[in-house]
Amino acid sequence: MPDIAALACALPKAELHLHIEGTLEPELAFSLAQRHGVTLPWPDVQALRAAYDFSDLQSFLDLYYAGADVLRARQDFHDLTWAYLQRAHADNLRHVEIFFDPQTHTARGVPMAEVIEGIHGALARGRDELDISFRMILSFLRHLPESEALETLAQARPFLDRIDGVGLDSSERGHPPAKFRQVFARCRALGLPVVAHAGEEGPPAYIEEALDLLHAQRIDHGVRAIESEALMERLARDQVPLTVCPLSNVKLKVYPDLRDHPLRDMLARGLKVTINSDDPAYFGGYVNANFTACVQALGLTEPEVLQLARNSIEASWVEAARRDALLADLDAAARRWRAGPA
Ligand code: ADE
Ligand code: ZN
């Protein structure tokens, strides 16, 4: 039997849905707590890991925002991002587009510059030392008022040369994309491309709002599109990329079991689906763990795995010359795999 999971792991890929704060492994959380003389509300790493038992998105977000309290200085953001990049490299990621949530940090008095420069410094190091290209996406917290998102955008203005796009995340239910129409219009006027979380817990109408009102170029998650035939047709026709996060969806009880996940149906319907890890420290694994779990639970085939890897590169914002080089690397890796062991 061909080992499709091994193929998926070996392929060059891009990750397009990754919250850098969601890569905070318990070991690093405790080491940063020690660095700053902070006491975490868990006695040790095991106890913290044991707390990763979520009933829905909100129960996760409560813990995720509490964990982020150890991120206080530029070096912390650098160390966090560098740890992620080493894992990304091990998973054969060649390009990453990462979210950061400035409001989670500025609300605690951490200056915007510390956040952005810390993350960006590590990404630049990853580009030079690991050949991983990158984009940074500033994400607004949708449970907060739009006025605070506008204030955050104003604070980010001096750093626009570091910011490649904007997104929308946090508690979805009751916080429709329409709430953020103005701030996203302002972002687009500044030339920033838009993505938005929609259709994770929220209804298909939120996906339509993200497309129609925010002009999102990609939809993060988008799995609840499967409930609307008209929306599925639109997403397939317009080839709107969906950054799907299978292990996240199971951990946050969007689906009771990975075998219930619609990823394969979505692919079969011609949707531009990608596989991503979302908050890998909390959800049980990085990109290759997501691919492996999907191969095992859903029986993904070789063409499906190749399509998913190809989609990740095509749906990215990497410049054309590198995109073409990554796609050529992908084709070469597939050929090597078909030729069998050397
Ligand atoms: N922030 C971090 N992970 C998220 C998710 N899966 N959905 C919404 N907001 C998030
Ligand atoms: Zn997410």
Image (cartoon, grey):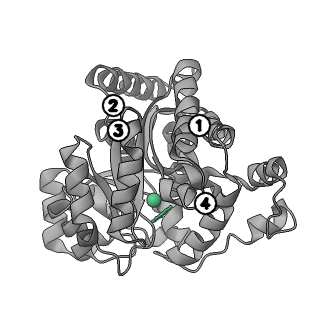
Image quadrant of ligand 2 equals bottom left
The numbered mark, 4 or 2, whose residue comes first in the sequence reads 4
Task: Give the CA separation, mark 3 to mark 4.
Answer: 24 Å
Reading the image, the residue beneath label 2 is 318
* SS type, badge 2: loop
1 or 2: tag closer to the N-terminus: 1
Q: Residues within 10 Å of mark 3 (few under 14, many from 20)?
A: some
Numbered circle sitting on residue 108: 4
**Real-space CA distance between mark 4 and mark 1, rounded to the nearest whole angstrom:** 17 Å
Label 4 to label 2: alpha-carbon separation: 33 Å
Q: Earlier in the sequence, mark 3 or mark 4?
A: 4
Image height of 86 relative to 241, above or below: above
Q: Is residue 188 left or right of residue 61?
A: left
- Label 3 element class: loop
Circle 2 or circle 3, nearest the eye:
3
Figure check: 278 above or below 47: above
Res. 187 visible in picture? yes
Q: Are marks 4 and 2 in contact (CB under 8 Å)?
A: no
* Residue at numbered disc 3: 164
Instruction: Place residue 244 in its image quadrant.
Output: bottom left
